[in-house]
Amino acid sequence: NFHYFLSNQSTLKKLVDSVQNNVRGFHKMFRQPITGTIWEEVLSNSFNDVGYKTTWKPDNSHKVGEDMSVVGVQMSRLSCKSGVFKNNRSHNLGPCVEFSSSRTTSFKTLEEKLEHLSKSHYDYHFMLSKKDKFDGTYKLLIIDANLCNVKDLDWEPNKNGKPDDYVTKSGGSFKATITGSMSGQLWVTLPLSRVSHIFDIQT
């Protein structure tokens, strides 16, 4: 399964090197940071380069959670994300990566939203993260989905008073918010100390 893929240092290094090469190829033509479906295609191409096919298709799919899986490899449902590095003070979490996740506008109560968000939609995040002001560098983060289960946290209405805005209480292992004005979008702030795989990617 995909856990063994990640534990094989030789194979993982080949994948990271391929991501590095494909990122550099993109930036030979473009200065803007890699995000969204561009990152999905870069990652899919990188798996192809090292002999693994993926299920990714260039159809701008909005399937919940999973953006691709690796053909023939169990537990390889991957969610491709663009993260931004932040130093979290509100929950005293220190250096973190912040990223958006699923929208929850079709679920009315906080309990319904959390029930939906905590279901298993993917196995790992593959996150190409950057500084808030892009400086031409990234870090590739590989994050086990179990590290981001929002039902592990205590929630409360956000102190901003806006309807359908919720935030997790201090003391949790990470921070999360749900923003009503953004279709109930989930935002996660995860300490970098909880990320097991971090690789520098240069342009």
Image: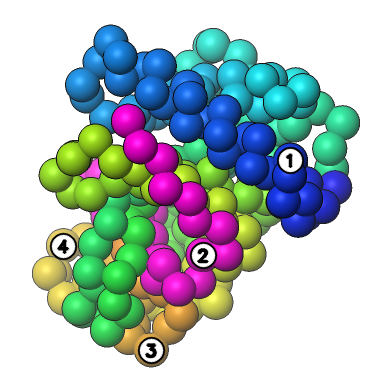
Q: Name the residue under label 4.
A: 162
Precedes in sequence: disc 3 or disc 1: 1
Q: Name the residue under label 1.
A: 11
Per the image, label 4 sits on a secondary structure element best described as loop
Residue 197 lies in magenta, yes or no?
A: yes
Left or right: residue 46 versus residue 81 is right
Query: Contact, CB < 8 Å: mark 3 with mark 2?
Result: no
Left or right: residue 201 versus residue 64 is left
Precedes in sequence: disc 4 or disc 3: 4
Q: What stretch is highlighted in magenta?
A: 178-203
Per the image, label 2 sits on a secondary structure element best described as loop
Q: x, y (%) of residue 45?
A: 59, 19
Task: Please state which amino acid type lies under the numbered disc 2.
Answer: Val
- Relative to residue 182, is residue 7 depicted above or below? below
Q: Mark 2 points at which residue?
A: 195
Q: x, y (%) of residue 197?
A: 56, 58
Residue closer to the observer: 50 or 69: 50
User: Which numbered disc, 4 or 2, marks the residue closer to the eye?
Assistant: 2
- Give the colour scheme of this rendering: rainbow
Precedes in sequence: disc 4 or disc 1: 1
| Residue at x 18%, y 40% (from the top left corner) | 135
Q: x, y (%) of residue 23?
A: 41, 26
Spatial CA span between label 2 and label 1: 19 Å
Spatial CA span between label 4 and label 1: 47 Å
Left or right: residue 163 versus residue 113 is left
The label number, if any, that marks residue 171 in the structure image: 3
| Residue at x 77%, y 23% (from the top left corner) | 51
Task: Please state which amino acid type lies under the numbered disc 1.
Answer: Thr
Q: x, y (%) of residue 167?
A: 31, 71
Label 1 crowd bin: few (<14), some (14–19), many (20+), radius 10 Å: some
Per the image, label 3 sits on a secondary structure element best described as loop
